[in-house]
Image (cartoon, rainbow, N blue to C red):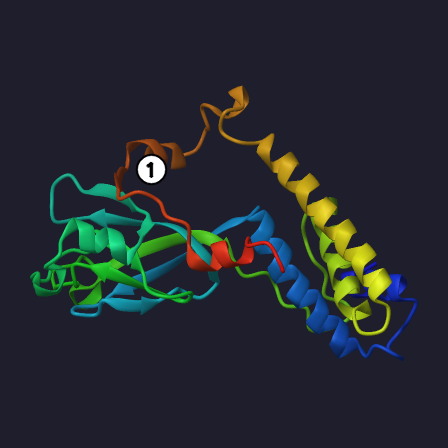
Amino acid sequence: MSIVQQVQTLLFDTNVFWPNQWLFDAINEAQFHVYAETRWAITSASFTLNSNADVFPLPGGIQIPRWIEGTNNLIQPPVVKRFFPTTQRNLEAFLRTWRGQNQGQPVYFVIWDATHLRCFPRPDALGSGPGGSYPFAMFGIGTPNEIVDTTTDIIGPATYVQAIQNYAAALLFEATRPDLADMYRSLAEQQILEFKKRLRHFQSHDIWQLVPATTRFEVDQGGEVYSTPDYYPLEGAINQPGP
């Protein structure tokens, strides 16, 4: 059964009391919540920074950025560098006169708001991309696929899908059956915790993952890391406890 049919089974309703569009909206909202809570799938998206453009939006498909990778082609041999989002406070502490600095190759990425970052220094026109732009790749938590009909399904581990299913049912039951809404929300939160526990068992400290057979190892271990990671505001807002 598709995710819509599974939620309809929990509701004991088929497009009568709860129209299908309500189900689509509830499932999509549940997806965003569970996806951001578990952060189980990392995706990437390419973007370029043009000359003199410092504030830029997150590339399409990225919900919560984790890190940015770029290649410095101005030196030989070229070096792959990894940049973690930092804060405006750290930038001010690093260089109080940052506004007056000359243009150059961006090496710091500051959190601007939930959907934008700010690079420092402002890009010049000496990049390796078209027109002297600077190409980058952003890695982070992606945006789940939108449910738009009754046949579209969610791909993922069973516990992850069940958490979305129960959370969507809780959202729909909230107005008429708050008791059932509380029950399904509690089930969803338990499944989220169980899924996060399973994910921890597959972290890099596991002995069988210490030597991955991919070229990503060279980037992960040999790349030059710039700045200390900071929590992204959207990620922190989602993880805050409710009232």
Residue furthest to the right: 12
Front position in the image: 21 or 189 = 189
- Type of amino acid at the residue the image marks with label 1: Val
In the picture, the quarter occupied by the C terminus is bottom right
Residue ID at (66%, 67%): 28
Instruction: Determine whether the residue tagged by mark 1 lies in a helix, strand or loop.
Output: helix
Question: Disc 1 designates what residue?
Answer: 219
Quadrant in which residue 135 is drawn: bottom left
Judged left or right of residue 1, residue 212 is: left
Q: Residues within 10 Å of mark 1 (few under 14, many from 20)?
A: some
Judged left or right of residue 36, residue 27 is: right
Image location (x, y in percent) of residue 197: 64, 36
**Could you tell me how many numbered marks the image carries?**
1
Judged left or right of residue 238, residue 46 is: left
Residue ID at (44%, 66%): 60
Residue ID at (57%, 46%): 40
